[in-house]
Amino acid sequence: MDLSYILNELGEDPEQYFGAISPPITQASNFAFSSVASMRAALADEYAHYLYSRGKNPVADILRQKLAALDGAEDALLFNSGASAIFAAVMPNLQQGDHVVSVAHPYTWAAKLFSDILPRYGITVTYVDGRTVEAFERAILPHTKLIYLESPNSWDFAIQDLAAVAELAKAEGIITVLDNSYCTPLYQQPIALGIDLVLQSATKYLSGHSDTVGGVLSGSKERLAKLFGLDYLAIGSGMTPFHAWLTLRGLRTLPLRLQQTSSTAMQVIHWLKQHPRIEQIWYPLDPSFDQYELASQQMQGAGGLFSLALRKVDRIDIERFVESLQHIRLAVSWGGHESLIIPRCAGIPASEFQPNEINHRMCRIYVGLESADYLIADLEQALNTL
Ligand SMILES: *Cc1c(COP(=O)(O)O)cnc(C)c1O
C-alpha cells in the first residue's frame, strides 16, 4: 500500500463528519443502537462494532488501520502505553509453567515483566546474547512458548537476525514478539521477515511530539481478534480517543521527521567521531558498528538515537558534561522534536560507578529536529568543559 495513501486517507471517511480534514475526537464512552438486533450483534462481536470505548472507538480505529497497514499486518491494537502493548503481547500467550527466551537487556519494563512478574506464575525466562541465532537455538526447551526480541536494542543497538530467528521459532511452534520502537515500520518490516507480533511505543517516533504516551501491537487478524475478545478488554488499557487523535496528528509527518532526525544524527556522529574526547560511538548504520552488515541488510534506516562513551572520565566529568549542555536536554524517552541526553551513570548508584567500565561511561543521545550545527555547537562547548 502506498505510504502517502496510508498517512493521508486510509481509514478516513470525512463525509461521516462534515467533511472535516482532521477527524473529530469521538469523545464518547458508549454508542447507542436503534434496535435490539443491532445491539445483540455488537455484544456478540465487539471486535467488529462500536459498543463501548474500552474496546473500539472511531478515531482510534482510524489510527489503528493506518498503523496495521504501515506494519504490513492484517490488524493492530492500540494501547495507552508501549509497556501495556508489551504486557498484552506476552502474558496472554503464556500459561503456568511455560518458558520464554528473551534477548538480553530488553527495555526496562519488559525486563521487569520477565524477572519479577512472570515468576509469580511459574514462568521461567532465559536471556540470550541475540547476536547469533545459535544462542536462541541452544536456549529453546520443550516448553518454550515465546521468543522475545528487541532489534536494535535502544542503548547498545545489538541486533538479531529477524528472518533467521523467525524461521527457527516457526519450526518449533514458538511465537515471536518484537519491539520495533527503534526503527518504526518505515525502517524495518518485521512482519515481512516472519515475526508474529510486532509492538512499538507510540510515545516515541509515531506520535513524535513528546506530548502523549501510547503503544501499538500488530499481527494476524486471528491472533489479535482472540486477544481483543478476552485479555484486551479485561486489561482495559486501550488508547483513549484524545491520545489516538494526538498520535494520528503526529503520524502524518513521520517520514519527514525520521528523515530529518536520521540525517542530522549522521552529521552529529561524523563530528563526534573526530573529537579526541569520544572513545566510542554506537549507531547501527555507522560502519564502525560491529553488526553493521546485518543492520544494513535488515534495516532501511536508523533514526536519531545513538550512544557514545567519553574517554578517560570519572562520573563527575560525565555529570558536568551533560549538565553543561544548553539545548540538548537531560531526560528519558526519545522520538520527539527535541534533542535529549541520558547518561548511563544516572541509573547507577554513585558508589557503584566504575570509570574503567566503558558501559558506565555511556551516554545515550537522541537527535531531535534542530539543525546539526546548533547541536554540534552545544556538544562542543560542553565537551570543552572537560
Ligand atoms: C519507551 C519504550 C518502551 C515503552 O513504551 P512506553 O510508551 O513508555 O510505555 C518500550 N520499548 C522501547 C524500546 C522503548 O524505548
Image (cartoon, grey):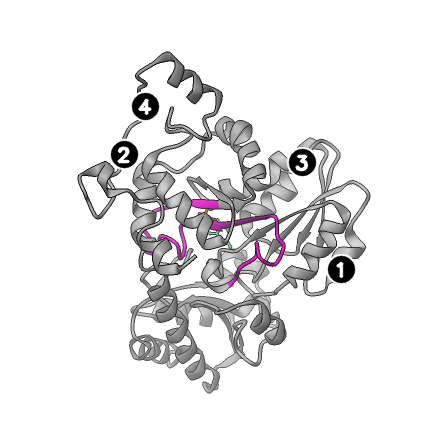
Nearer to us in this view, 35 or 381? 35
Q: Looking at this rendering, what residue extends furthest in the top direction?
A: 36
Say which amino acid is labelled 3.
Answer: Leu
Mark 2 lies within 8 Å of ligand 1 (Cβ measured): no
Give me the residue at 35% from left, 79% from top. 376
How far apart marks 4 and 1 lie (CA) works out to 50 Å
Mark 1 vs mark 3: which is more N-terminal?
3
Say which amino acid is labelled 2.
Answer: Thr
Q: Nearer the viewer, mark 4 or mark 1?
A: 4
Mark 1 vs mark 2: which is more N-terminal?
2
The answer to whether the residues at label 4 and label 2 have Cβ atoms under 8 Å apart is no
Question: Which contiguous range is marked in magenta?
Answer: 188-216
Q: Of the numbered discs in the image, which one, if any, rests on residue 111? A: none
Element under disc 4? loop
Give me the residue at 54% from left, 57% from top. 348
Q: Badge 3 local density, few (<14 within 10 Å), some, or many (20+)?
A: some
How far apart marks 1 and 3 lie (CA) works out to 22 Å
Residue 133 location, x and y as percent?
73, 62
Mark 4 vs mark 2: which is more N-terminal?
2
* In the rendered image, the vertical position of residue 254 relative to residue 239, given as above or below: below
Q: Of the numbered discs in the image, which one, if any, rests on residue 31? A: 4
**Magenta includes 200?**
yes
Q: In the picture provided, is 271 more to the left or to the right than 160?
A: left
Say which amino acid is labelled 4.
Answer: Phe
Mark 4 lies within 8 Å of ligand 1 (Cβ measured): no
* In the rendered image, the vertical position of residue 178 relative to residue 93, given as above or below: below
Say which amino acid is labelled 1.
Answer: Ala
Residue 338 location, x and y as percent?
32, 63
* In the rendered image, the vertical position of residue 145 relative to residue 205, given as above or below: above
Q: Determine which residue is flagged by label 2.
A: 26
